[in-house]
Image: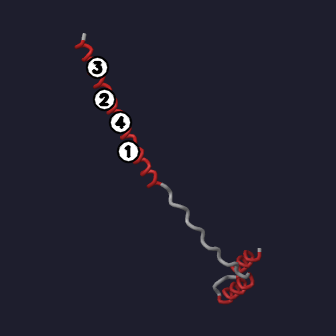
């Protein structure tokens, strides 16, 4: 009987040690995979949105109409283009 008890005790110790080692290895692998996943997600993160451009100062509509008239007089704008731009400015 003492030999049988010693054999059972040895088996229990070996099995317990194997279980503890196996659990530790599993935890370490899970932690490494979690770190790799976090790095992969960090690399794939979208870039932050660009900062909004400063707003241009509101131009004087009279000055813009004068510029459009000058362009029309120079022949850069046709009468239809001038009318469209004028309507856009005023309306």
**Circle 3: is it few (<14), some (14-19), or many (20+) Cα within 10 Å?**
few
Tell whether 4 sits left or right of 47.
Answer: left
Find the residue positioned furthest to the front: 2
Q: Dot 2 corresponds to which residue?
A: 17
3D distance between C-alphas at marks 1 and 2: 23 Å
Which tag, 1 or 2, sits closer to the chain's start? 2
Label 2: which secondary element: helix
Callout 2–callout 4 Cβ contact below 8 Å: no
Q: Dot 1 corresponds to which residue?
A: 32
Which tag, 3 or 2, sits closer to the chain's start? 3
What numbered label is drawn on residue 9? 3
Tell whether 34 sits left or right of 56.
Answer: left
**Circle 4: is it few (<14), some (14-19), or many (20+) Cα within 10 Å?**
few
In percent of width and height, residue 28 lies at: 36, 40
**Circle 2: is it few (<14), some (14-19), or many (20+) Cα within 10 Å?**
few
Q: Nearer the viewer, mark 3 or mark 4?
A: 3
3D distance between C-alphas at marks 3 and 1: 35 Å
- Residue appearing at x 72%, y 85% in the figure: 63
Decide: is 64 above or below 39.
below
């Amino acid at each position: 009987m003492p030999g049988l008890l010693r054999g059972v005790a040895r088996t229990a110790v070996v099995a317990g040690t194997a279980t503890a080692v196996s659990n530790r290895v599993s935890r370490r692998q899970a932690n490494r995979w979690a770190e790799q996943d976090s790095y992969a997600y960090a690399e794939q993160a979208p870039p932050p949105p660009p900062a909004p451009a400063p707003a241009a100062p509101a131009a004087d509509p009279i000055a813009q109409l004068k510029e459009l008239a000058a362009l029309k007089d120079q022949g850069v704008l046709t009468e239809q283009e001038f009318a469209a731009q004028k309507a856009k400015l005023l309306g």
